[in-house]
């Protein structure tokens, strides 16, 4: 009897955990009830747990659309929903163990993306310190960056995308997210000077990766398909970027 009771206990525990897991996955796919305010622009929709002016939200979506439209793997027919978690408990709920990062993408489970708190009126994401993220990384940057993860994963296939080196996985979304705010010559000079912003681990920025992607796409005229399928290593690209100096 004791063994039988023990088996029943573990079966109930496993069943309970499976129910919780299924409920949580459904929550990630359909989180709209937790985000009261929303606005849409064509295939993009922005949701927030705090009120915002619809015209401000729509303007940000239109900026993100323009950036995404520069990518040949982006389709304006595919919907993307962005959920901004201003309250701490929502961030913890939807970001789970990754709470504290700027944004999170759950594709291929869902094309929904989740972002930390934001001041939509100022087009700014809020950092963990409580201050707006300054510089070129605007709210539309983070939206574009996270959606870029979705479209690159879809284009490359989940398994192949997972095996891509980080400089490609994060470099192309950064490339799209920064858009015209990225200046190749300035970034290259910072790279040659070994500037802090070029160290992904010290600065938290993907600017180094952006530079390498920009070199391949804009200088070598690679296609995005080549970028996502070619196995060229990071050091080889960095050597090519450095070698440009002798060709000037």
Image (cartoon, helix red, strand yellow):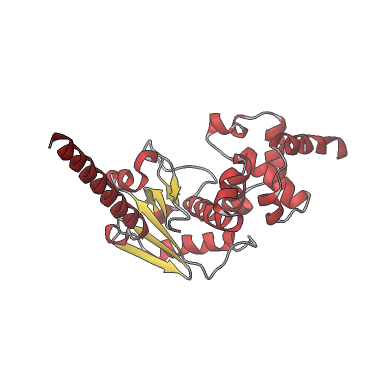
Q: Quadrant of the C terminus?
A: top right
User: Please, which residue is most extreme toward the right here?
Assistant: 247
Q: Is residue 92 left or right of residue 58?
A: left
User: Please, which residue is most extreme toward the front here?
Assistant: 1
Give how far across and how far down residue 215 sits, in percent. Answer: 73, 46
Q: Quadrant of the N terminus?
A: top left
- Residue at position x 64%, y 47% from top? 182
- Residue at position x 54%, y 63% from top? 65
Give how far across and how far down residue 107 sits, in percent. Answer: 47, 54
Q: Is 110 or 138 nearer to us in this picture?
A: 110
Q: Is 16 or 141 nearer to us in this picture?
A: 16
- Residue at position x 82%, y 35% from top? 243
How many numbered discs, if any?
0
Give how far across and how far down residue 139 sits, in percent. Answer: 47, 51
- Residue at position x 43%, y 53% from top? 122
Q: Is 97 or 99 nearer to us in this picture?
A: 97
Give how far across and how far down residue 126 sits, in percent. Answer: 40, 44
Q: Is residue 150 left or right of residue 218?
A: left
Note whether 239 is above or below 218 in the view shown.
above
User: Please, which residue is most extreme toward the left here?
Assistant: 1
Note whether 165 is above or below 179 in the view shown.
above
Q: Is residue 214 left or right of residue 6?
A: right
């Amino acid at each position: 009897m004791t063994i039988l009771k023990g088996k029943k206990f573990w079966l109930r525990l496993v069943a309970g955990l499976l129910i919780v897991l299924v409920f949580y996955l459904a929550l990630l796919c359909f989180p709209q009830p937790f985000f009261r305010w929303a606005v849409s622009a064509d295939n993009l929709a922005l949701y927030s747990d705090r009120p915002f002016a619809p015209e401000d939200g729509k303007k940000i979506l239109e900026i993100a659309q323009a950036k995404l439209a520069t990518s040949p793997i982006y389709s304006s027919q595919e919907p993307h929903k962005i959920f901004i978690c201003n309250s701490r408990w929502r961030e913890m709920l939807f970001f789970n163990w990754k709470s504290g990062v700027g944004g999170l993408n759950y594709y291929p489970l869902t094309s929904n993306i989740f972002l930390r708190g934001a001041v939509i009126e100022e087009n700014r994401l809020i950092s963990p310190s409580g201050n707006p993220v300054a510089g070129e990384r605007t709210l539309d940057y983070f939206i574009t960056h996270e959606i870029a993860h979705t479209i690159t994963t879809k284009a490359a296939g989940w398994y192949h995308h997972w095996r891509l080196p980080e400089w490609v996985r994060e470099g192309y979304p950064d490339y799209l997210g920064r858009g015209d705010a990225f200046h190749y010559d300035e970034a290259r000079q910072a790279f040659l000077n070994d500037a802090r912003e070029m160290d992904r681990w010290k600065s938290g920025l993907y600017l180094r990766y952006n530079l390498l992607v920009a070199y391949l796409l804009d200088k070598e005229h690679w296609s995005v398909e080549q970028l996502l399928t070619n196995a060229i290593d990071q050091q080889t690209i960095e050597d090519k970027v450095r070698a440009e100096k002798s060709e000037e």
